[in-house]
């Protein structure tokens, strides 16, 4: 097994939901089932608008008694916390920004495990992610992490793209219905649970075969930024997609992008403009189920 490397994800934060109704409240707001969440698993989840557009993506798990913790990119945390708080009403649930209490680490080279399984190490937790040997470790901010070599932020971003996984960031808020970033394939949507904001649109996209955009993995010899538009060489006026995540190594960038499926049928795709750096399509590390 390769050596484990780690990176402190300083651009991540943690929301705490505390109270007797914490799980049921989140169950009614997010795309995943939190009512049946046990202590040995985490949940990939999204928070949507009424139109089914993702405001945030996160990983949730049970903390202490009547407590759910949500780890998510910090640039979407404040707005997510504010909007979720609007819906608490009479629920016995207190939401707070607990980022100062926790440190979030990305790990590569960990022992193989099914995605979203959770291991506990005292007060710390380690959550398996999609992709070989990927995990998140969330621990007390003052705690010294287990000894491991340090990776670069670019190595972590490359591994995320290689796994075909993207998170909603500030630049992509409301850009995607969950399936547009393959969120349901990665375990982020439960289609059997009750209602949540945007549920009807997310379900319709799933069952009526109306999805025309998907996340794909590309390479390019240029640098790419999250939120940057992608164009088809034959259509310089209308963007064909948007970059969702990227990391670079040795002058090559591996990126995830939400893209029109029709744009993959022929021609070329380019970064920033129809004459910009060319993108090379790479195979996804998982299969997309066919639409009926």
Image (cartoon, rainbow, N blue to C red):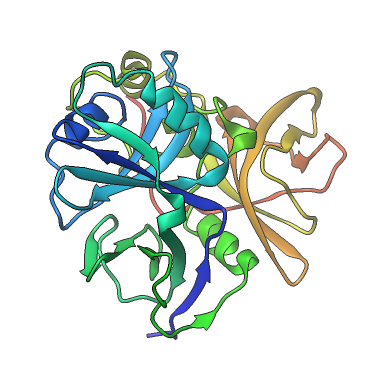
**Residue under the point 47% across and 57% down:** 163
For the residue pair 188 and 145, the one nearer the viewer reads as 145
Question: Looking at the picture, does residue 49 appear above or below residue 125?
Answer: above
**Residue under the point 55% across and 55% down:** 161
Residue 8 locus on image (x, y percent): 52, 67
Q: On the picture, is 119 further left or further right than 198?
A: left
Asked if one can make out residue 281 in the rendered structure from this viewpoint, the answer is: yes
**Residue under the point 18% across and 21% down:** 194
For the residue pair 86 and 119, the one nearer the viewer reads as 86
For the residue pair 81 and 238, the one nearer the viewer reads as 81
Question: Looking at the picture, does residue 59 appear above or below residue 222?
Answer: above
The single residue placed furthest to the right in the displayed view is: 275
Question: Looking at the picture, does residue 51 appear above or below residue 77?
Answer: above
Q: On the picture, is 28 further left or further right than 225?
A: left
- Quadrant of the image for the N terminus? bottom left
Asked if one can make out residue 288 in the rendered structure from this viewpoint, the answer is: no
Question: Looking at the picture, does residue 52 appear above or below residue 23?
Answer: above
- Quadrant of the image for the C terminus? top left
Residue 262 locus on image (x, y percent): 60, 28
Residue 140 locus on image (x, y percent): 37, 65
How many marks on residues?
A: 0
**Residue under the point 77% across and 55% down:** 223
Q: Residue 274 sits in which quadrant?
A: top right
Residue 249 locus on image (x, y percent): 69, 69
Q: On the picture, is 33 further left or further right than 238?
A: left
Q: Residue 124 sits in which quadrant?
A: bottom left
């Amino acid at each position: 097994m390769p050596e484990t490397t780690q990176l402190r994800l300083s651009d991540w934060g943690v929301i705490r939901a505390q109270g007797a109704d914490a799980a049921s409240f989140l169950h009614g707001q997010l795309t995943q089932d939190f009512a049946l969440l046990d202590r040995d698993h985490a949940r990939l989840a999204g928070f949507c608008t009424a139109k089914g557009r993702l405001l945030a993506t996160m990983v949730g798990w049970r903390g202490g008694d009547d407590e759910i913790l949500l780890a998510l990119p910090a640039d979407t945390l404040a707005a997510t916390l504010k909007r979720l708080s609007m819906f608490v009403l009479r629920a016995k649930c207190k939401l707070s920004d607990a980022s100062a209490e926790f440190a979030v680490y990305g790990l590569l080279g960990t022992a193989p495990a099914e995605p979203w399984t959770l291991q506990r190490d005292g007060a710390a937790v380690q959550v398996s992610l999609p992709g070989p040997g990927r995990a998140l470790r969330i621990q007390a901010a003052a705690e010294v992490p287990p000894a491991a070599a340090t990776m670069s932020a670019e190595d972590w971003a490359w591994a995320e793209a290689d796994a075909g996984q993207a998170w909603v960031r500030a630049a992509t808020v409301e850009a995607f219905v969950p399936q547009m970033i393959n969120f349901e394939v990665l375990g982020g949507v439960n289609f059997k649970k009750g209602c949540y904001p945007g549920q009807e649109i997310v379900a319709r996209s799933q069952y009526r075969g109306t999805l025309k955009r998907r996340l794909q993995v590309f390479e390019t010899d240029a640098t790419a930024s999250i939120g940057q538009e992608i164009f088809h060489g034959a259509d310089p006026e209308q963007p064909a997609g948007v970059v969702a995540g990227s990391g670079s190594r040795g002058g090559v960038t591996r990126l995830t992008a939400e893209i029109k499926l029709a744009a993959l049928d022929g021609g070329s795709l380019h970064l920033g403009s129809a004459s910009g750096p060319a993108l090379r399509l790479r195979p996804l590390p998982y299969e997309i189920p066919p639409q009926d």
